[in-house]
């Protein structure tokens, strides 16, 4: 087997592993989207609770509203990540097909002496390089979108912690407001952990 | 690499069988490909699966300039018939693929675009190869529901796809059937199981019995020639098909 053939076959497990990693990232994104939806419902309930508590919980109400906005922003952010993930699936599928076709074309070139076939192989390899570059570019975009999501979650964390402080001023509603703000904080932490695990995905680290 | 054997020649009108690859892994079914040439152009019949593309391409190139191929005839849609299509089209994007209308939107999953496919209607069609008229003969349900064979009335050769196929044991790899009775044992189970309709089989036998055929060339196994052609048609006519063990 030639060195080129060995290099071609070695890429198959890598591309296959990438596909598996992408699937895992997508599953984690689905989890975050579900949690983001939960924040939206919780924030809506918190707004009603703040209204019942009156002026003492006005600050809490403002923060709850901001958490609703955060929930929507987070879902938009996750939609961007999902769209990039779909792009990555397309590109990895192309790379997998490239690998097979290139292997077969290389074998045919090695077995025959048709100059045109060597040209076809060269064209195929140039296209393969293009697909690899496109995948690398999508990988970077995905990583950037993930960092954006992370920044957003940092903001969500600040909002949740501020809500905790505001809850303390809720007078007779302090206990239920503290409970709700604690739940916010817990959920934002859950999202942060999900995003942290995505950051560590071998799809980005290559390990 | 596969070997090529010219089974008919009259000037530049040729039938070339591309057969028997000693390096083929055993988990892949063995296939025969056929090349028809006329007027400097070629038509490749059932070009085979993607995994056998290197062996088929190199064998074909040893006999004929592959850039002079004008098209592919696919008897039906199976992967061992034409999953190499994308690779052939990568070599020559202008090649056309003649196939039953039934499969013309399924085979593009192997490769090609709308411009690649020439749909054959159920009743069959003539396919011109630089003035040589080849006839796509209906063989529906034998075994595929949209299935054609290809008849060359000048060469008196019928490419019969899976009809006549035999799964030969190791060591029995002669290109032509040498002992019909011994050979047909390797074809019987295949035909009983893979051919789905006794009615379709009867119609095919009636149709081809009226043709002048010197050679009946299946996609697997050995070629029937001379008296063995009629012997095969009679044998097939008598066989009960569409039978599974369970």
Image (spheres, helix red, strand yellow):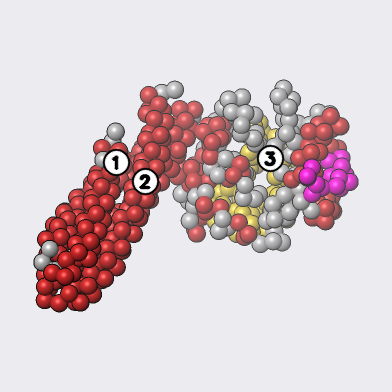
**For residue A201, which numbered disc appears in the image?**
1
Count the marks: 3
Q: Which residue is mark 2?
A: A24
| x then y, percent, for residue A103 | 44, 34
- Circle 3: element type: loop
| x then y, percent, for residue A181 | 20, 61
| x then y, percent, for residue B103 | 60, 56
Task: Tell me if I can see residue B52 in this picture.
Answer: yes
**Residue A3, quarter of the rendered image:** top left
- The structure residue drawn at horizontal position 17% and vertical position 56%, both measured from the top left corner, is A157
Residue B51 is left or right of residue A180, and the answer is right
Residue A91 is left or right of residue A173, and the answer is right
Q: Which residues are magenta?
A: B230-246
Q: Nearer the viewer, mark 1 or mark 3?
A: 1
- The structure residue drawn at horizontal position 61% and vertical position 34%, both measured from the top left corner, is B28
- Circle 2: element type: helix
Q: Nearer the viewer, mark 2 or mark 3?
A: 2
């Amino acid at each position: 087997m030639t060195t080129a053939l060995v290099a071609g076959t070695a890429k198959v497990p890598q591309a296959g592993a990438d596909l598996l990693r992408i699937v895992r990232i997508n599953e984690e994104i689905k989890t975050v989207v579900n949690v983001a939806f939960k924040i939206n419902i919780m924030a809506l309930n918190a707004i009603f609770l703040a209204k019942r508590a009156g002026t003492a919980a006005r600050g809490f109400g403002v923060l709850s509203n901001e958490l609703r906005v955060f929930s929507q922003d987070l879902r938009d952010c996750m939609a961007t990540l999902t769209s990039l993930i779909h792009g990555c699936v397309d590109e990895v599928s192309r790379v997998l097909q490239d690998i097979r076709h290139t292997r077969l074309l290389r074998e045919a070139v090695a077995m025959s002496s048709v100059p045109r076939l060597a040209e076809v192989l060269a064209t195929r390899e140039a296209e393969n390089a293009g697909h690899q570059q496109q995948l690398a570019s999508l990988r970077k975009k995905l990583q950037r979108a993930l960092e954006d999501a992370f920044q957003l979650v940092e903001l969500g964390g600040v909002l949740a912690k501020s809500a905790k402080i505001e809850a303390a001023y809720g007078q007779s509603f302090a206990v239920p407001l503290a409970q709700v703000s604690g739940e916010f904080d817990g959920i934002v932490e859950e999202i942060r952990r999900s995003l942290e695990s995505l950051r560590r995905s071998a799809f980005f680290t290559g390990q | 690499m596969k070997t090529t054997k010219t089974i008919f020649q009259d000037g530049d009108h040729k039938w070339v069988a591309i057969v028997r690859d000693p390096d083929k892994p055993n988990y892949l079914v063995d296939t025969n490909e056929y090349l028809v040439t006329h007027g400097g152009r070629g038509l490749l019949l059932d070009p085979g699966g993607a995994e056998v593309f290197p062996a088929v391409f190199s064998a074909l190139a040893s006999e004929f300039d592959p850039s002079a191929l004008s098209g592919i005839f696919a008897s039906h849609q199976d992967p061992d018939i034409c999953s190499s299509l994308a690779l052939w089209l990568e070599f020559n994007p202008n090649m056309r693929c003649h196939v039953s209308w039934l499969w013309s939107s399924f085979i593009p999953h192997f490769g090609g675009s709308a411009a690649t496919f020439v749909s054959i209607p159920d009743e069959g069609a003539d396919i011109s190869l630089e003035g040589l008229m080849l006839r796509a003969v209906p063989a529906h349900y034998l075994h595929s529901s949209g299935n054609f064979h290809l008849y060359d009335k000048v060469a008196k050769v019928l490419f019969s796809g899976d009809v006549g196929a035999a799964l030969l044991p190791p060591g029995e790899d002669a290109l032509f059937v040498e002992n019909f009775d011994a050979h047909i044992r390797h074809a019987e189970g295949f035909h009983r199981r893979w051919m789905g309709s006794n009615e379709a089989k009867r119609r095919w036998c009636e149709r081809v019995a009226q043709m002048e055929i010197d050679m009946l060339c299946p996609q697997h196994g050995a070629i029937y020639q001379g008296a063995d052609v009629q012997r095969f048609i009679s044998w097939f006519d008598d066989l009960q098909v569409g039978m599974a063990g369970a």
